[in-house]
Amino acid sequence: MATELIDRAPAGPGGLPGEEAAGVLLAPAAPRSALRRLAGSRSALGAAALLALLVLAALAAPLWADHVAGTTPYANHITDRVEVGGKARDVVSPDGVPIGPTWRGRFFLGADVNGRDIMVRLLYGGRNSLMIGVAAALLTALLAVATALVAGYFRGWVDGVLARGLDVIWAYPVILLGVALGTAFAVGGVRLGPVELAGDSKAIPVLVIAVVYVPYMARPLRGTVLALREREFVAAARAQGAGAVRVMWSEILPNLLPGIVVLLPLMVANAILLEAALSYLGAGVRPPEPSWGTMIDDGVARIVTAEHLAIAPGLMLVLTVAALNVLGDRVRDALDPHAGAGT
Amino acid sequence: MPGTGAPLVEVAHLQHSFRSSGRGRPAVRAVDDVSFSLGAGETLGLVGESGCGKSTLARSVLRLLEPSAGTIRFAGRDITALGARALRPLRREMQMVFQDPTGALNPRRRVGSIVSAPMRWQGAGRFAAEQWTRELLVRVELAPEHAGRFPHELSGGQRQRVGIARALALEPRLVVLDEPVSALDVSVQAQIVNLLEDLQRDLGLAYLFVAHDLDVVRHVSDRVAVMYAGKIVELAPAAALYERPVHPYTAALLAAAPVPDPRRARARPRPVGGEHPDPSAPPPGCRFHPRCPAATAICRTEEPPLTEYPGGRLAACHHPLAVGPQELAAAARSAASPRSASHRLPQPAHVTA
């Protein structure tokens, strides 16, 4: 079926000579045929299916916890015993080694040193990791688009101030800045006007990750805005009396969308990775709240005696990030009909 | 129709400088002390080589570029210093059609949205805007169904028709046409020029028609202005300019146009050689002198004034062509002359033809 779709996919939108030179970020409108090309790519479908599965699993976390595992992500079962292969075994052995995968409802993927069900924590942790990743990427996109539009449209000193601000963020290594901001916010909480975030709020990692990645998205978008504002349709809009906000919103922004769509899956992947890194370093999601990062942190110390503790969340992280990267690449290919045909 | 009543547009001593990047480099005076007027319903052709400043001048008239000096009056009102807000109601009256119809249409918006945008921005209701958009599309010889298309689904000529429809949406009195046909096929060029003529006749539009060769504006213009290196060198009624050019540059431009008959082509004067001067370092005196076959010592030092000859012909040349002794005697320095120009009028001894 996939090959059928490829065969039916058109060569490109319009196929006009003047438009071939335009890069992805300036690609002409062709959402429908781009979507068709995307649906014709087996790897894109595979990645999308995997992501859908991960999201569904995270959504179904309470179902698994209540009806299959019969526990919560926070409940300790150190002194419990569980039946495996007809024999009753300690969830955590007297010398502190947690049980491995039972491949049954209870402790499907084993337990951690506190006797908590890894599978249940993995599903709830997935909720946190995916939610934080997507929210942070969307917030990054929002901040980056606003910055890029204003800086690229007004240029001059406005651009200078914004670009230097981005440079300041850019100058710090992502993880260093993330840890610094995450720690500072976690201690004191955040007060943004009427919004007040407690130190253990999950919005704090979202905010930190979003801010840290803004320059990575704002810089390429600003370049695109600079190119777009010189196009004659912008002059035409101004000649008709359109003000700055109107030009940015209805003339330039629609032309930025393909670029944003391309960058977004990659931003989500980066945000999830950074969340894991920050949580691993204790500057992201606060224990006992599970996330893939905190779970890897829990597991690393016992990687020799109880390898499943780190492998399970690590595998989820790899799958998610790989799927997002594949999807991002395919979206880029689909929007740019002149790039190599990837399937 | 030309010249009836007060002029719609009056440009006086307009200058536009581009700051050049790089320290110590002088600013580029793309438009250097240009004056002209345009009457209601009139067409003024504006012709010159690439880089002579004609597009900059055209955009300055609409205040799309900020002039560095001089004044622009529209319908008697000085609009040179008006802010964006004060300018907005005037935007209805003056519109522009762009050279590249592909670049001038937002690729992510449908034709209907492009054409109706100015009406909606100026506060028209949705239904009225849609109705008027359909009428406009028919007016520019497209079909109402084109409203649902994206620009990339149209041909070059159709796109330019969309650009014209958009310019007409607010029922302007002035339309600046910035090389409206030079990106189009020759067969399509004629259709678009005819359309523009019909629209002018029906709607009483004034056109400032920018082109890089004289052929295109020949039939549509009432008067033609020839620009060279940021200055107007000749401005005359179209027929006079084509039949009896006064400035050697105008004559050279006319000679550069291809002629279908090779025998006639051979008999004509040769076009001038050389390059358009570097606009950041224009030659002193008459800017055309390095390329001019008639140049003498005075041309190298003294900038000629725009001299008015009988019949409404203006030319800035010390050695005018096609000017008789009586005409020379009746000549006067025009108020449209650049401020830097000399007060010495062409002398009989200097006349070349």
Image (spheres, coloured by chain):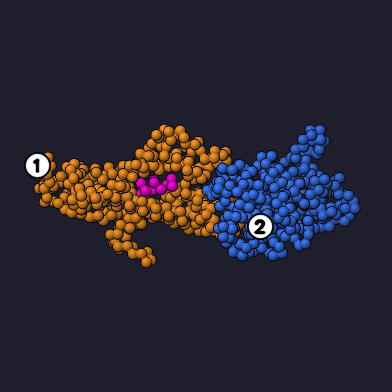
Chain colours: A orange, B blue
User: Where is residue A84 shown, x and y percent of the image?
Assistant: 12, 42
Residue farthest toward the bottom in the current orientation of the protein: A194
Q: Nearer the viewer, residue B146 or A238?
A: B146
Residue at left offset 30%, top offset 47%: A56
Quadrant containing the N terminus of chain A in the rendered view: top left
Give the labeled residue for mark 2: B171
User: Marks 2 and 1: which is nearer the front?
Assistant: 2
User: Where is residue A58 shown, x and y percent of the image?
Assistant: 28, 49
Q: Is residue A85 left or right of residue B12?
A: left
Give the labeled residue for mark 1: A87
Residue at left offset 37%, top offset 48%: A268
Instruction: Report if residue B195 lies within the magenta region.
Output: no
The local crowd at label 2, few if under 14, some if 14 to 19, many if 20 or more residues have their Cα within 10 Å, is: some
Residue at left offset 50%, top offset 51%: A254
Amino acid type, label 2:
Glu
The local crowd at label 1, few if under 14, some if 14 to 19, many if 20 or more residues have their Cα within 10 Å, is: few
Residue B10, located in which quarter of the rendered image? Answer: bottom right
Quadrant containing the C terminus of chain A in the rendered view: top left
- From the viewer's perspective, is residue A326 above or below residue A274? above
